[in-house]
Amino acid sequence: MTREEIKNRMLSQISDEYDKSQGSFFHDVINALAIELEKAYMNQNKILDQGFVETATGENLDRKAAEQGISRNPPTKAKTIVTIHGLEGVTIEKGTKVASDAASYIITESKTIDSSKEANVPVECEEAGAIGNVPVGAIKYFPVTISGLTSVTNPNPVTNGYNGESDEKLRSRYYNKVRTPATSGNKNHYKNWALEVPGVGDARVLPLWDGNNGTVKVVIIDSEKTGAEPELVAEVKKHIEENRPIGADVTVESASELSIDIKVRLTIDTNNYTMDQVLENIEESIRKYLKEIAFVEDYVSYAQIGSLIFQSKGVMDYSNLTLNDGNSNIVLSNTDVPVLGVITNVE
């Protein structure tokens, strides 16, 4: 209800023998009250929204999910092995920090540099979440100079830091549990167990996957809708083993990443965009699309890719589009997850 509606209703209750025109005592007093009542109505609607899973957010959504025994998955800290170079005999103490441009990492195990003048040590990002995910060589600093240590690097990319579960993902998991009841180790039960592990973006359950009773394969993708790291697969396996029915033979695997390489001849708006900018715009759109269809669709749409290219900023027209050197949909198996490969502008 708006301020005007409230004000007019209240004024209508006052006898016309009194002055109710703008600027009068009654008008000004009731107008001020109507403003506050309008705010109260608005807050009332917001409060009401927080009582339903469909519209609740943050802690209020947590409370609604808890009614079904569902907890929001917390963020996890990225972990990796770094290689530190230095003088033989120098001990790298647990708690020592190394860093990338974006994050700091704490060494979790003391090690002594041997005659090779290097040591591989485990580290954990100080801050939980995807901020700890970095490419090869990004961890290259000692925040504080340490005598006897000369350099540090990460020989492998770091990808196992996961952000906390979003409202959208938690809400989806809530509806999945409510609408697909899990009982006695059925297919839904295994999917719910997999989704309870922080970092899991989705899961597919394949009963009787090798033809024998009691065998179950659970295929997972991570929260970025790409193949899962071995550590995440192990966490899911452990969690399911703690909950599965006795006698079930469970296999947990990462989905196989199917790279989608795109070749296309682009006509672009050269007055406002460079080719690199246009390709970045296309890449962003297609990555989003591939995430949306991961474990949802069983093919990558040739037509949809073309539409996304045409709608990308800076694109005026396109031709000669191919996906993995073909001009048709890319079929996905039930263990595939599509990921963007290389986008090439064909001159």
Image (cartoon, rainbow, N blue to C red):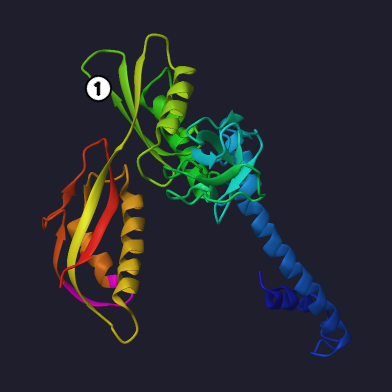
Q: Which residues are magenta?
A: 311-318
Q: Residue at x 65, y 34 (%)?
A: 93
Left or right of 154 in this view: 9: right
Q: Residue at x 25, y 71 (%)?
A: 310
Left or right of 231 in this view: 217: left
Residue 317 within the magenta-colored segment of the rendering? yes
- The N terminus lies in quadrant: bottom right
Instruction: Give the camera-side residue of 212 and 123.
Output: 123
Q: Residue at x 76, y 68 (%)?
A: 37
Q: Quadrant of residue 327?
A: bottom left
* Residue 181 versus residue 4 in the image, above or below: above
Measuring from the top left, give residue 171's x and y in whole percent. Answer: 51, 44
Q: Amino acid at mark 1?
A: Trp
Q: Quadrant of residue 190?
A: top left
Q: Does residue 235 appear in this view?
A: yes
- Return the residue at label 1: 209
Q: Circle 1 — which element?
A: loop
Instruction: Give the camera-side residue of 181 and 23.
Output: 181
* Residue 263 versus residue 165 in the image, above or below: below
* Residue 76 versus residue 140 in the image, above or below: above
Mark 1 closeness class: few <14, some 14–19, many ≥20 residues within 10 Å = some
Measuring from the top left, give residue 118's x and y in whole percent. Answer: 50, 36
Q: Residue at x 33, y 80 (%)?
A: 273
